[in-house]
Image (tube, coloured by chain):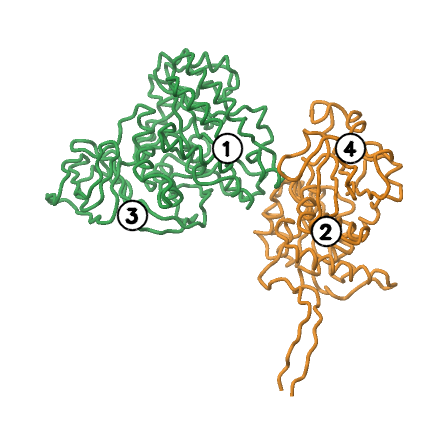
Amino acid sequence: MGAASLVIRGARVVDPVERIDRVLDVRLDAGVIAQLGDSVDANGHRVIEAAGRILAPAFVDPHVHLRTPGREDEETLATGAAAAAAGGYCAILAIPNTDPVVDDPELLRSLQARAAAEACIPIGFLAAITKGQDGAVLSELGALADAGAAGFTDDGRPVTSAGLMRRALQYNAVTGKPVAVHCEEPSLTRGGHAHAGQVAAELGLGGWPSLGESLMVARDVDLAAETGQHVHLMHLSARQSVEHLRRARAASAPVTAEATPHHLCLTDEAVRTLDPNLKMNPPLRAEEDRAALIDAVRDGTIAAIATDHAPHSREAKDVPFEAAPFGVTGLETAFAALYTYLVEPGVLALETVLERLSAGPAAIFGLDRPRIAVGAPANLTLIDPAASWRVKAERFYSRSSNSWLLGGRLHARIALTVAAGRLVHEL
Amino acid sequence: MTDLRVVGGDLRPPAHGKRDLLSVADLTRGDVERLLATATSFGRSQERDNKKLPTLRGRLVLNVFYESSTRTSSSFELAAKRLSADTMTLKAAGSSVDKGESLKDTALTLAAYDPDVIVLRHPEVGAAAFVARLTDACVVNAGDGKHQHPTQALLDLYTMREAFGRLHGLQVAIVGDVAHSRVARSLVQALRLVGAEPILVGPPTLLPAGLAPTSHEIDAIADADVVYVLRMQRERMLEGANFVPSLREYTERWGITPERVRDGQRVMHPGPMNRGVEIDSRVADSEAALVVDQVRAGLIVRMAVLYDLLTTGPVAVETTVEVA
């Protein structure tokens, strides 16, 4: 797959950061944006007629479980990247809770080499904060950063010791990379399968209370403030967590945050179906939580939307709700879900969603911002906002199909994705 | 000549495909009234010497129990037999479950026998809904973890109606470990459906918010018509579980003793009872107790449920009038 040379003609070009929102032609020469304008000369390139479509900077997902190494039956670097490309992404960051855990520079290097060879879009790798994510011994943060770690996280297994987290943040000054935290106080969430609220009470499911998250958020934003080190809060779900985040940011603590499409689109009412594809960690919460997340995404307090794409094998999810593992896929449906649930009803502006999917996460992790400007490498996604499509298991590029949207109908579809100058997806 | 069918009091459920009984939440008030009415007529049939009815001859009812049970499994089996259905009860212990067979494969295996009804008890929330998605059989949830046990709620309503002659406005205090009780969850919903008024009484750590009014004062049972005592799940009362400091303290504060039951109150318990823990033996054996009535109601209510699922509903008053 070589660098793309083509002309995308007549699309509504929207780049919120570059303050572009108008119908333009865009010419790519060998993977670089060469010209923006009205009636751009095709220059012998392939021309894509894109009237009625939206051309935007491609997306960046800072929170993807690629299950490699260890569970390649659930996802591989190649299938995860293909799923991301189909969802409009030009770059993703992989979470290190694999088997073995990515806590070793050599393993990290081998994954990077494999990704460069096998994946159709760039993949960055986060490394574990602690060896084996056991919460006991620090990983070699410096060596891992030198080997190219995009940041550090023990996602899935929170660092329960405040002392160790403080030490990790203090030491992490040598790397300058973000520390991404999964906020969960295990003594409050043990046995929890759904948000501790009305729905869990009625269904008899063990409760996973908001406090199980927000208590840890309070700790970690205070640790960020005290150490002066960047803490990124992953997949926030609770109103109280957002309040802690706001307080910390108002006091200029170096704290950023992300929210997932499923927490922005759904509440725990959806769990009443007992469909295992509605079981995630943190769990879906109440409407007031969802509203708080949306407000925070709107005003930029939450600067990134991340999928927490978590593939699971069919047999793992083909069990009663209570027995099912946490996690849902999301790469291939994220934009369409956000468009259908939030943009079309007028809850969030299109520009806001596009920014939080792209420039927002890129800035948090210090990545080059995908942008539509002459001379920039092409990282573009072309969206058909008029498309209506049904989410079907057999259509996924991902090796897993545990989507919360399975069987549902979505509006807007990714028609084409260019990542790092290469055409990586076309419907 | 035209046949004109006149149907009076048509209580039939809407005719659609497969029907399941997974949760009281899926029932309407009309469903409950219909099921109780059917149970009443089956109750009369059980007063005869020949208690067997031919209604479900040739039908297959499979009882699949992943958890221990005396009342529920025996009453479903007997209910199926009294309606002339073939029936078989499978217990997880001694089956392929011991060999690690998944619930999915067990369900698909049993479905190959083309059962008309699968009655399922399983320790995990969502198990009955899961099996219902896998099979064409009608699935009756006989308990899925802490979630639901709808036939228990129906037999409890039946028992209360027999004892009081009404359900509307009845005050029912449900006492004990509500948090871990599928019986309590089902019953609260069922009571609401028929206009009765539940209140939950017990240790604050065992009363989930949002189901019904709660009180941790045992005095709150004073106004109730029915004191519904839940089984104290002893394993949850052990040291270290910390829901209550000790079994002794539980019994002291929330145990149902003769002193705490006022005249006219009736006492119910879904069984099995821990005498001397949640209920004093003197109460369990008193005239106020309806425990044996509940077991009797269990048989005819389960007959009604099987009948209702496998027919279009009760035989409505139906006459054929010849029109010249």
Neighbour tally class for label 3: few under 14, some 14-19, many 20 plus, Cα within 10 Å = many
Quadrant the N terminus of chain B occupies: bottom right
Residue under disc 4 on the same chain as residue under disc 2: yes
Q: Nearer the viewer, residue B18 or A250?
A: A250
Residue under disc 1 on the same chain as residue under disc 4: no
Neighbour tally class for label 4: few under 14, some 14-19, many 20 plus, Cα within 10 Å = few
What color does chain B have in the rendering? Answer: orange
Q: Are marks 3 and 4 in contact (CB under 8 Å)?
A: no
Residue under disc 3 on the same chain as residue under disc 4: no
Q: Secondary structure at mark 4?
A: helix
Q: Find the distance from the CA under tag 2 to the CA under tag 1.
A: 42 Å
Amino acid tagged 2: His
B207 relative to B294 in the view: left or right: left
Q: Chain of mark 2?
A: B
Amino acid tagged 4: Asp
Q: Is residue A136 above or below residue B181?
A: above
Residue beneath disc 2: B168
Q: Chain of mark 4?
A: B
What color does chain A have in the rendering? Answer: green
Q: Position of residue A45 (x, y in %)?
A: 14, 44
Residue under disc 2 on the same chain as residue under disc 1: no
Q: Chain of mark 1?
A: A
